[in-house]
Image (cartoon, rainbow, N blue to C red):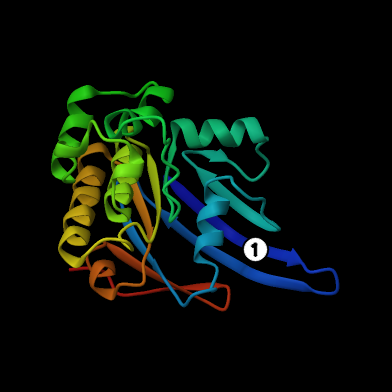
């Protein structure tokens, strides 16, 4: 298993009470597997991705990524996890304003010592950015910036890609193309893809579906 989550819980102390966001969440993902995480707003989907990425601490339970138990990682170890193993596509693009599109795409891969110019060029072509490589983020639309963020994460060939509504700022045609590229990349590189989405249409293209409700997950139908 590339990812194994066991009895995971996350609670927040509000000062007068404890708010339970996740409770007793358990599931596994294999190498190159694709999984859609669905659920209502506020159900804890983004929180779950943050915990798997080592961006927040768990209240109890276990998260194993690529054979490493990450729940007791130091900040340095968590940063190394995100540099070498886990790719992130969140709703905030977090592009570097002073770098061109081409340099933004290459940035994470270079830091991770995984940069492959041909792969980065292929991604830019497939995701519709070839004519924008010399531009800076401020010259791009929100949808174009999201595509840069997606290409940047794929360029580093992560073992696990966490995507929080990665097509939320894209039109339906572009969303389909971008998800197709992510699925193609997962199959080609062995990357596992865990994607939060509100779109049943996109979720149906994933191999598995989980629904998060009231802090717990249930398995959904398998994509055909």
215 or 146, nearer to the observer: 146
Q: Residue at x 49, y 37 (%)?
A: 82
Q: Residue at x 32, y 50 (%)?
A: 146
Residue 79: quarter of image? top right
**Picture coordinates of residue 11, whole percent (x, y):** 70, 65
Residue 12: quarter of image? bottom right
Q: Residue at x 26, y 62 (%)?
A: 206
Q: Quadrant of the C terminus?
A: bottom left
**Picture coordinates of residue 64, whole percent (x, y):** 54, 45
> Is 177 left or right of 33, judged from the image as shown?
left
Residue 36: quarter of image? bottom left
Element on which disc 1 rests:
strand
Q: Residue at x 51, y 61 (%)?
A: 46
191 or 45, nearer to the observer: 45
Circle 1 is placed at which residue position? Answer: 9
> Is 169 left or right of 22, judged from the image as shown?
left
Total numbered labels: 1
> Is 98 left or right of 127, judged from the image as shown?
right
> Is 6 left or right of 159, judged from the image as shown?
right
163 or 145, nearer to the observer: 145
């Amino acid at each position: 298993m590339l990812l194994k989550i066991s009895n995971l819980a996350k609670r927040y102390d509000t000062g007068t009470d404890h708010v339970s966001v996740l409770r007793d969440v358990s599931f596994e993902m294999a190498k190159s597997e694709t999984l859609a995480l669905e659920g209502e707003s506020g159900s804890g989907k983004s929180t779950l991705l943050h915990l798997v990425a080592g961006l927040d601490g768990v209240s109890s339970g276990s998260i194993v990524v690529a054979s490493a138990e990450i729940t007791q990682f130091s900040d340095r170890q968590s940063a190394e996890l995100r540099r070498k193993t886990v790719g992130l596509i969140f709703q905030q693009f977090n592009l570097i304003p002073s770098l061109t599109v081409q340099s933004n795409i290459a940035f994470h891969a270079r830091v991770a010592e995984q940069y492959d110019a041909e792969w980065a060029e292929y991604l830019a072509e497939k995701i519709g950015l070839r004519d924008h490589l010399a531009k800076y983020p401020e010259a791009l639309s929100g949808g174009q910036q999201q595509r840069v963020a997606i290409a940047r994460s794929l360029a580093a060939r992560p073992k696990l890609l966490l995507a929080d509504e990665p097509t939320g700022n894209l039109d339906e045609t572009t969303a389909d193309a971008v998800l197709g590229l992510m699925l193609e990349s997962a199959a080609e590189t062995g990357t596992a893809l865990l994607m939060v989405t509100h779109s049943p249409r996109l979720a149906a293209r994933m191999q598995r579906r989980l629904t998060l409700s009231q802090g717990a997950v249930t398995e959904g139908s398998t994509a055909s």
